[in-house]
Image (tube, coloured by chain):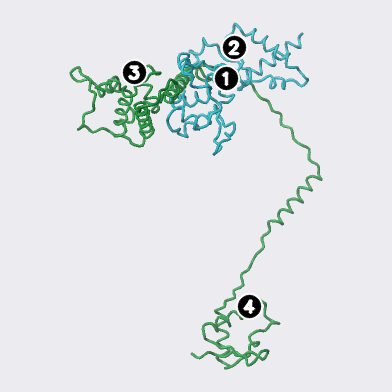
Chain colours: A green, B cyan
Amino acid sequence: MAIDRVASGMRPTEKSLPKIYGENIDALPQDLYIPPDALEIYLDSFEGPLDLLIYLIRKNNIDILDIPMANLTNQYINYVEKMKAIKFELAADYLLMSAMLIEIKSRMLLPKPILEDDEDDPRAELVKKLIEYELMKDAAENLNALPKVGNGIMIAQSYFEKTTEISYPDVSIDELFEAWKNVLKRVKQFEQHQINRSELSVREHMTIILRKLNEKDLLEFSNFFDSEKEPIPKLVVCFLAILELTKEGLIKINQQSSSSPIYLQLGEV
Amino acid sequence: MAQVEKLKEVIEVALLTSSQPLAIEDLSRLFTDKTDRSTIRMLLDEIKNDWQDKSMNLVQVASGFRFQAKVDFTEFLMRLTPDRIPSYSRAVMEVLAIIAYRQPVTRSDIEKIRGVSLNSNTLRQLIEREWVDIIGQKEVPGRPSLYATTKYFLNDFGLKSLSELPELNNTLEQEISDTNIDKNVEENQEN
């Protein structure tokens, strides 16, 4: 019985489904392929659960202030079940409403202390929402029907020719000179400072040191540094080379006692 | 006398050539010497009378005065632009109605009334159209934005103020006050 009412209360059946032998087809054939998007149109024809509920209420001439919850919930859930089968994520808001309807119904069934207050009616909150939504839904339709600029309201806008006289500013010779100085200043700021990378290789110096030590077995540390002739970066690289050689065990560094000369010699290979 | 006639003509031509409605402040900028508001207002009234029997009317909307074609001609003029102006979806119009009648509202207020989550595209369409904008934040956790309708909304709908919005459905409002559910609605009724 409830299912029959849902079927006849559904919007698509009246308008879009065909008749066969004079009978409405109120269910889609099971074995027919339905493009998944086609049924979304049913969903899209409602703006949400409240819209669907209002549709069911108005369709069945239900008094909105005294909603038969069981009946309405039944119809609603039937509709949503169909929807859910098709596009679950779209139906999320609708499922939430199903839960609310069932909750309201079950609260109505619960035995309760004597109450005369209308506000304790579990349906009050829902009714409030339904009415407010329907109010806004009507208002939206009315707004849409209002004439708007460009669509119903045509506004005047005549053409007028704007004449703009071009006036040239005066320029003195001093200002020109100032401008030129500024250009020069700016050019200077954009000058590029060339940085040359000096090719100092630690490896190269390691080789040089090893060569020297091959010639003379033992050399004093200071022999490797000619601090007067050679630039500082070169001295640093030379020192790094010595450390590197020591680390690799290719040379040995000896010093008899503190502040006595330091000697380098080839390591035992 | 001749000078007053001239002032009137200047105002008239300014209104006819402007793409936007002009407020009295805008119109006073037309003149180098001080012209008081009451003079301009009086001249506007005269212009309004002068045009009474012509094809255009001088009307007042939210941000000022403008000339618009009399309603009788709309039908003809609409034929000049046969490409139908795209209409907004039901969702967009519902959101606009909620903002217009219940402003200022937050996103969640809108969602509560409609019972569905709000696609941000819907709000953006209204903001891009400059019918709706954000007028502040509600001082609740999360400080949600408060939306309201703009002057352009009123201009485009040919309204001087929100009080000229079509009245809400009477029988429905009756039902609400019967159940004494919503205080806001009653406040709105008074407005």
Q: What residue is at 32 percent from the left and 35 percent from the top?
A: A87
Eye-nearest disc, 3 or 1: 3
Separation of marks 1 and 4 at Cα, in angstroms: 82 Å
Separation of marks 2 and 3 at Cα, in angstroms: 44 Å
Q: Nearer the viewer, residue B112 or A153?
A: B112
SS at mark 3 in the image: helix
Q: Which residue is mark 1?
A: B162
Q: Which residue is mark 2?
A: B57
- Which picture quadrant has residue B103? top right
Q: Quadrant of the N terminus of chain A?
A: top left
Eye-nearest disc, 1 or 4: 1
Q: Nearer the viewer, residue A230 or A266?
A: A266
Image marks 2 and 3: residues in contact by CB distance under 8 Å: no
Q: Label 3: how many residues lie within 10 Å, few (<14), some (14-19) or many (20+)?
A: few
Query: Is disc 3 in the same subunit as disc 4?
Result: yes
SS at mark 4 in the image: helix
Q: Label 4: how many residues lie within 10 Å, few (<14), some (14-19) or many (20+)?
A: some
Residue at the limit of the structure toward the front, as seen here: A113
Disc 4 marks which amino acid?
A: Val
> Left of A160 or right of it: where is B130?
left
Image marks 3 and 4: residues in contact by CB distance under 8 Å: no
Residue B4 x, y percent position in the rendering: 74, 11
Q: Which residue is mark 4?
A: A236
Query: Is disc 3 in the same subunit as disc 1?
Result: no
Q: Which residue is mark 3?
A: A59
Figure check: A181 above or below A101: below
Separation of marks 3 and 4 at Cα, in angstroms: 95 Å
Query: Is disc 2 in the same subunit as disc 3?
Result: no
Q: Tell which subunit mark 4 falls on.
A: A
> Left of B102 or right of it: where is A235?
right
Image marks 3 and 1: residues in contact by CB distance under 8 Å: no
